[in-house]
Amino acid sequence: MKSAALLALAALALADPVFAQAGHQHEDAHAGHDEHGDASEPETGERDTSEPSEIAPELPTDHAADGVFSSAEMDAARAQLRREHGGARVATLMLNLAEYQVRSRRDGFRWDGEGWFGGDIHRLVVKTEGELAVGDEVDEAESQIVYSRAISPYFDLQAGVRYDFAPHPTRVYGTIGFEGLAPYWFELDGALFLSERADVLAKLEGYYDQLITQHLILQPRAELQISAQDVPEHEIGSGLSEFELELRLRYEIRRELAPYIGVSWQRKTGDTAKFARRDGERESSTSLVLGVRTWF
């Protein structure tokens, strides 16, 4: 009997921790459910169904620095902050085209660039473009000085003066135009020109940068030139006088320096083509172009 009693006591001693552990696990499980329920609902037992306010909170006025520095010092510091974050005056010079053209008759050079100084809204812009044949005088050369005003996040309105150095006789034009980024990332540049002799010309240019890689970029480009009347001294006919279709492939060694290769096709139309045939020139020409695009 004593042996049986001892065995029974030993079994109860071994079983007690097991039942105790099971009891603790059961309590922990209920505790977890209770905590989850408290986290999913507010303490009041009711859900917050109120909608967020559409009125923005007022700007804080209790700046700690105002208690240390004078009003004049804080006004000067805030003015400098505005200038450095959006109101800065900066300058940029860019050569979009600086190329050698391999032609069927005489090779030539061509340039197209601009520089500007100003901020995000107001800028002074200087543009220049032209071309010449190797061993000959400059065929075409013009410069523009325009005031540029941002009228939207993507477009600028421009107005100023254009001066043609060549061909002769020289001309001075008043100009109004636009420059900006159209939907689907098309760069557009257009202008209307009025000369001192009441000649009205127009130009529209557009191009698109297609990224093949982060450094290799294919750029199709088109340019149209239009005249409201014949200008015989410059061999320009009324209507669509000339257009260009071009394709360039550039490699950006870095963003500021990108050599390129491409092809350019130019075509004179209407009375402009008649003037060209009269002078023994071709109505159209195709060129292999080698150049560099750079800015700083």
Image (tube, grey):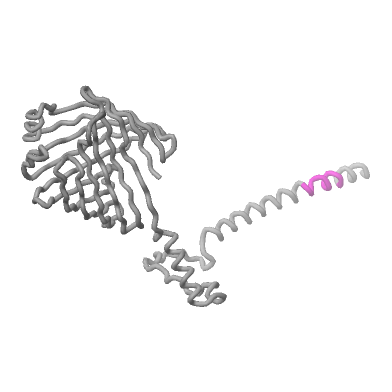
In this rendering, the count of numbered labels is: 0
**Side (left or right) of 268 relative to 115:** left
Q: Residue at x 46, y 64 (%)?
A: 81
Can you say whether 282 is above or below 161 in the image?
above
Q: Residue lying at the far top in this picture: please name it.
A: 104
Can you say whether 61 is above or below 252 in the image?
below
- Looking at the picture, how far across and down is residue 277, in whole percent? 8, 28
Which of the image's four quarters has the N terminus? Answer: top right
Looking at the picture, tell me which residue is in the foreground, 258 or 198: 198
- Looking at the picture, how far across and down is residue 202, in whole percent? 15, 45
Looking at the picture, tell me which residue is in the foreground, 124 or 109: 109
Quadrant of the rendered image containing residue 246: top left
Q: Residue lying at the far right in this picture: please name it.
A: 2
Part of the protein shown in magenta: 9-17
Quadrant of the rendered image containing residue 131: top left
Looking at the picture, tell me which residue is in the foreground, 276 or 91: 276
Magenta-colored stretch includes residue 13? yes
Which of the image's four quarters has the C terminus? Answer: top left
**Side (left or right) of 228 relative to 182:** left
- Looking at the picture, how far across and down is residue 3, in whole percent? 92, 42
State the predominant SS element of the stretch in magenta: helix
- Looking at the picture, how far across and down is residue 130, in whole percent? 24, 39
Q: Residue at x 49, y 72 (%)?
A: 74
**Side (left or right) of 284 relative to 7:** left
Q: Residue at x 35, y 37 (%)?
A: 293
